[in-house]
Image (tube, grey):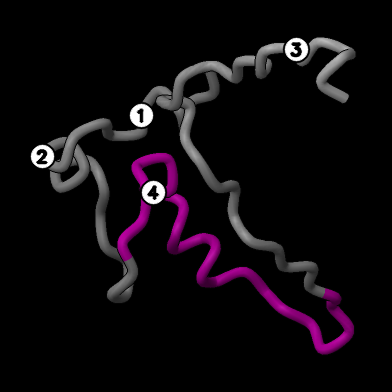
Amino acid sequence: MAESEAETPSTPGEFESKYFEFHGVRLPPFCRGKMEEIANFPVRPSDVWIVTYPKSGTDLSPPHQEPPALPLSAL
């Protein structure tokens, strides 16, 4: 299990106690102690940024199950 998954709160109470705010943005625990360095990262006019959506979903969902097979006569 990745560090970020191990530290991800599973209840609302844990969410409030582990997450923190940085400049008005609520962030997960694995960002703690890194935000000042990121905020002061030098950016050049020639830099190219590739931005995507974050991972969605959770690993708390039940495992994927295959649907039951249909008999060939049903096709």
Residue 35 shown in magenta? yes
Q: Which-is-in-front pick, marks 1 and 2?
A: 2
Q: Give the residue type that dot 1 points to.
A: Glu
Label 1 crowd (10 A; few <14 / some 14-19 / many >=20) = some
Instruction: Write down the residue under mark 4.
Output: 33
| Cβ–Cβ under 8 Å for marks 3 and 2 | no
Q: Residue at x 54, y 16 (%)?
A: 63
Mark in front: 3 vs 1: 3
Q: Earlier in the sequence, mark 1 or mark 2?
A: 1
Image side of residue 19 versus residue 29, left or right: left
Q: Earlier in the sequence, mark 4 or mark 2?
A: 2
Q: Which residue is mark 1?
A: 7
Residue type at numbered disc 3: Ala
Q: Determine the CA span between mark 4 and mark 2.
A: 22 Å
Image quadrant occupied by the C terminus? top right
> Which residue is depicted at the point 36% across and 56% down?
27
Residue 13 disc label: 2
Report the residue at 44% width, 26% height from top: 61
Give the structural element (helix, strand or loop) at label 1: loop
